[in-house]
């Protein structure tokens, strides 16, 4: 498999956006596909600050179930995650992975330069003192903060609808300097991530979408390729690294 992309100079800067589609082949549900998370739950009930204030037990139950799924030994990084970790290790320029996913599969595959713009499921945060800690167990309304001792203020360290994504300044700065922007497994329906292609194009970057199906913003990209992430992403990484050989 070969992609119709230009030859990039050694040291070219790459920004990669990943969405739920890259983790689907690891056994994690997407959100907006048929049978996805938002077809079984109303986001207004489990993924907003108002929902947490209204019914914290329901919100905790929802995220506890998702956390238990993520620690299932059957859920593991796939070939697409591994390929991006390889690109980060071997590419001679900057590689930044920006993910909309709250799972930790990129890290488990070996990626290190990461921005979780929507937060991380395996972390919790105290609304009182702001302490953020790694967390793998269930969380409840009776759980106490280890730092300040407050009870009832612990929440998943995820970005809910109506909240500001993390790392936006760093992301926009990287997009403004990017030579290549790649979007993998995203629906193109959630902003601000759906607008990243605009920022990359404004910077003069070449833009590439890899997706199971064309996203809502696919027409903006220079090249769109459809298929499984576990096939497309390793092929792209191999082609880029072959370009980078001296």
Image (cartoon, rainbow, N blue to C red):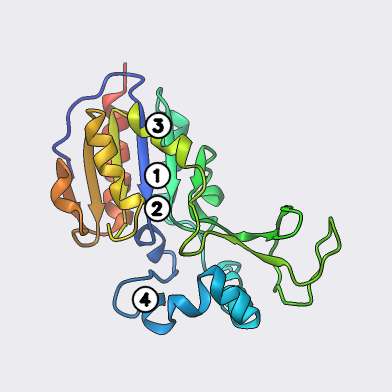
Q: Residue at label 3?
A: 174
- Distance between the alpha carbons at the discs numbered 1 and 3: 21 Å
- Distance between the alpha carbons at the discs numbered 1 and 2: 6 Å
**Is residue 222 in sight in this rendering?**
yes
Q: Are marks 4 and 1 in contact (CB under 8 Å)?
A: no
Question: Residue 245: x and y, percent?
Answer: 31, 21
Question: Crowdedness of circle 3 by 10 Å Cα count: few (<14), some, many (20+)?
Answer: many
Nearest to the eye among marks 4 and 1: give it. 4
Q: Are marks 2 and 4 in contact (CB under 8 Å)?
A: no
Locate the C terminus by quadrant.
Answer: top left
- Distance between the alpha carbons at the discs numbered 4 and 1: 25 Å
Nearest to the eye among marks 1 and 3: give it. 3
**Is residue 61 in sight in this rendering?**
no
Question: Residue 39: x and y, percent?
Answer: 36, 81
Q: Residue at label 4?
A: 36
- Checking the image for residue 83, the label placed there is 1
Q: Are marks 1 and 2 in contact (CB under 8 Å)?
A: yes
- Checking the image for residue 79, the label placed there is 2
Q: Secondary structure at mark 2?
A: helix
Residue drawn where x is 15% and y is 40% of the image: 222
**Side of 194 relative to 66 (left or right):** left
């Amino acid at each position: 498999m070969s992609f119709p992309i230009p030859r990039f100079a050694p040291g070219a800067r790459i920004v990669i956006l990943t969405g739920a589609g890259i983790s689907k082949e690891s056994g994690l549900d997407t959100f907006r596909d048929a049978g996805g998370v938002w077809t079984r739950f109303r986001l207004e009930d489990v993924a907003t600050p108002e929902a947490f204030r209204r019914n914290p037990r329901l919100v905790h139950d929802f995220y506890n179930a998702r956390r238990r799924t993520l620690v299932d030994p059957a859920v593991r990084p796939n070939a697409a995650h591994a390929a991006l970790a390889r690109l980060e290790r071997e590419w001679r320029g900057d590689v930044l992975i920006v993910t909309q996913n709250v799972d930790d599969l990129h890290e488990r595959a070996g990626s290190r330069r990461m921005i979780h713009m929507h937060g991380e499921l395996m972390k919790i945060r105290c609304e009182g003192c702001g302490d953020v800690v790694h967390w793998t167990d269930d969380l409840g309304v009776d759980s106490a903060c280890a730092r300040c001792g407050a009870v009832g203020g612990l929440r998943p360290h995820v970005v809910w609808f109506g909240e500001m994504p993390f790392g936006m300044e760093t992301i926009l700065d990287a997009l403004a300097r990017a030579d290549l922007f790649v979007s993998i497994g995203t629906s193109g329906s959630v902003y601000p991530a759906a607008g990243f292609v605009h920022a990359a194009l404004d910077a003069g970057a070449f833009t590439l979408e890899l997706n199971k199906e064309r996203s809502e913003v696919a027409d903006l990209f220079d090249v769109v390729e459809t298929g499984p992430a576990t096939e497309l992403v390793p092929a792209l990484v191999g082609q880029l690294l072959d370009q980078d050989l001296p």
